[in-house]
Image (cartoon, rainbow, N blue to C red):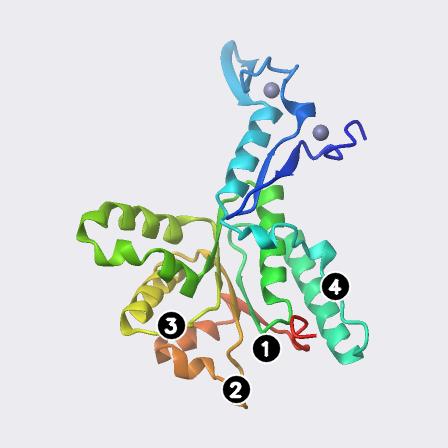
Amino acid sequence: MNCPICKDKKYVSKKSFNYAQIEKCECSYDCKICNNWGHIPFYKDGYRYLKKCECKKIDEKIKRYNELRIPARYANKKLSNFKIEMFNKVVADTQKGILKTLNTYIDNFDLDSKGIILYGGHGVGKTHLLIGLLSHLVLNFEVTGLYLDFPQWILENKSLFTNFNLNEQLQAEMNRITTVDILVIDEFAKNRTQFEKETFEKIFYERYNKRKIMFIGTDYEITNKGNGKYMGDMVSPALFSRLGDFNSFEANLLIGDDYRLN
Ligand SMILES: [Zn+2]
Ligand SMILES: [Zn+2]
């Protein structure tokens, strides 16, 4: 290891109040390979080509991460620091199983990978796992992503939906949501109005039809209509049946106590 500050990751976390942010580590301010040009020339069959320098790849990685919109309070949520329940073996085993599933998912990841649904009661760690998975993929593969807490996103973007003059801005926002490589939809289907429901389903279908990856977090029951809220009552029957499409999604039930209340 050459740099004790970033442990050779070349980036460090940056203080921020809204979204989690990282920045280049001081060990990497200057690139001796390309003199900060970002490209390296090479020759093949008498022609000159350019390839990306490692330093440019770091810049791009930092940019992709900083665009994820992970709330700052979740900045350090990683799969590696997910805490396994200590006093309940059933819960612990489920958590270990899901971590194993997610790590296998990472090992085999490509843009044709399925989506993932994590469901289970409030506070069992779905958001932690979804964010840990998303940031790992974006930091280790050349993919873009976005974290969307859907009800929160509706709140923050109310003005876009009600002000006709902001149409272009809304279009750009919708574009980004439907085209990023990986979209995390947390609080899935927690819609209050018909309008929210329609916007939500529109986003879902656009991505579903283009086979774009979605990671879904929800506390609605999916497999059986037990006690608690049932996903089948919250979304249209057509969308609900898509969630059960095993070619598109792997569903994982997370059980556990609400650690935020303990
Ligand atoms: Zn460093
Ligand atoms: Zn360079």
Q: On the image, numbered disc 3 is attached to which residue?
A: 191
Q: Quadrant of ligand 2?
A: top right
Percent position (x, y) of residue 258? 65, 75
Q: Residue at x 65, y 70 (%)?
A: 260
Task: From this view, report whether residue 71 is shown above or below residue 193.
Answer: above
Identify the amino acid type marked 1.
Gly
Image quadrant in which you'd find residue 192: bottom left
Q: Secondary structure at mark 2?
A: loop
- Spatial distance from mark 3 to mark 4, Cα to Cα? 30 Å
Task: From this view, report whether residue 144 is shown above or below residue 206.
Answer: above
- Spatial distance from mark 3 to mark 2, Cα to Cα? 16 Å
Please identify the residue farthest to the top as the structure is shown. 46
First in sequence: mark 1 vs mark 3: 1
First in sequence: mark 3 vs mark 4: 4
Q: In the rendered view, does 1 fall on the left or right side of 185?
A: right
Task: Identify the image quadrant of the C terminus.
Answer: bottom right
Task: From this view, report whether residue 29 is shown above or below residue 202.
Answer: above
Q: Tell me whether circle 2 and circle 4 mark residues in contact (CB < 8 Å).
A: no
Q: Residue at x 63, y 18 (%)?
A: 31
Q: In the rendered view, does 92 fall on the left or right side of 177?
A: right
Q: On the image, numbered disc 1 is attached to which residue?
A: 121
Q: Tell me whether circle 2 and circle 1 mark residues in contact (CB < 8 Å).
A: yes
